Amino acid sequence: SADENPDLFWALRGGGGNFGIVTSIDYRLFPVGPEIFGGAIAWAADAAPEVLGLYRELVETAPPETTIVAALRPAPPAPWLDPAIHRKPMVALFVCHTGSMGSVEPLVARIRSIGRPVGDILQPRSYVSQQALLDATQPSGRRYYWKSEYLGGLADGFLSRSIAGTREFASPQSALLIFPLQGRLNELPGDDGAVGNRDAHFVVNIAGSWEMPADDARNIDWTRGLWENLREFSTGGTYVNFLTEDEPVSRLRSAYGSNYERLAESKRKWDPENVFRTNKNIAPGE
């Protein structure tokens, strides 16, 4: 806890499974619902410049109860999408608003003012329904390879390269995802848990996803190629949960930023033999 072994308590909140086995957790809950406003809206890929331009504006001005995630990907054969767009490149926005319904209406009106959507399931819904919205896109048994970077903002060059790089995909299941990190994530002090890079405003994840082992090389190359083309826009950090098994230690260090050395010191104190190492491993400090 914050009072008993506070250094361990700090390391556990962001340090993954490096420091032991957590046997119980006390959660502080916040009221949500009974309904939130959420769902998704999508357009054909030729609308991407307008959609992502508006997205950049909206995430800076949206109320704190609102999160919007952007995606560039081939359209899945989902029932809410026009069948004519299936397997073709699209751009989508995923919205979750936990405030009053009235406060989100102007934002939704602006989103819906863009062109002709190929699918729109933005509506009041249960929070559980929102949580399950993308379950079908990440099934067990599929093959995955991801690359990510933290971003200070959405530069014009980043958006244009993202759009150009997703005109063709190595797999119809792959995607480029942009998550906003503003609000409370930025407001918490850097020493409030071991999560690094709290000054980042976005994280981009290039999420390679495919079916057959024979296609590994082609899909990994696609993911790495798009990542390499976008890296210059990075803050230099990356999100630890998106790291893959082939990442060097330098990438793990970049995920924790200035917190890495303190984590290594805690590791030396609490797990000097590195027993808990089947993870994004932080080696004990010297």
Image (cartoon, grey):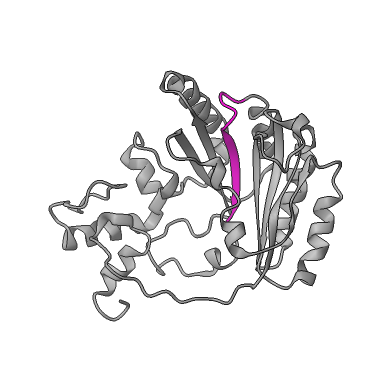
Residue sticking out furthest to the front: 79
Quadrant that contains the N terminus: bottom left
Residue 140 image position (x, y, % from top left):
44, 40
Q: Which residue is drawn at 28% across and 65% down?
A: 22
Residue sticking out furthest to the left: 273
Relative height, residue 282 to residue 127 (above, below): above
Relative height, residue 5 to residue 70 (above, below): below
Q: Which residue is drawn at 66% across and 46% down?
A: 70
Looking at the image, which is closer to me, 27 or 59? 27
Residue sticking out furthest to the bottom: 3
Q: Residue at x 64, y 73 (%)?
A: 34
Relative height, residue 170 to residue 243 (above, below): above
Does 250 sit left or right of 126 as displayed? Answer: left
Relative height, residue 134 to residue 77 (above, below): below
Residue 233 image position (x, y, % from top left):
58, 41
Does 238 sit left or right of 104 as displayed? Answer: left
| Residue 115 quadrant | top right
Q: Which residue is drawn at 56% across and 26% down?
A: 171
Residue 170 image position (x, y, % from top left):
56, 23
Which stretch is magenta?
Answer: 169-180
Looking at the image, which is closer to me, 49 or 109? 109
Looking at the image, which is closer to me, 180 or 42? 42
* Magenta stretch holds residue 162: no
Numbered label tally: 0
Residue 50 image position (x, y, % from top left):
80, 42
| Residue 213 quadrant | top left
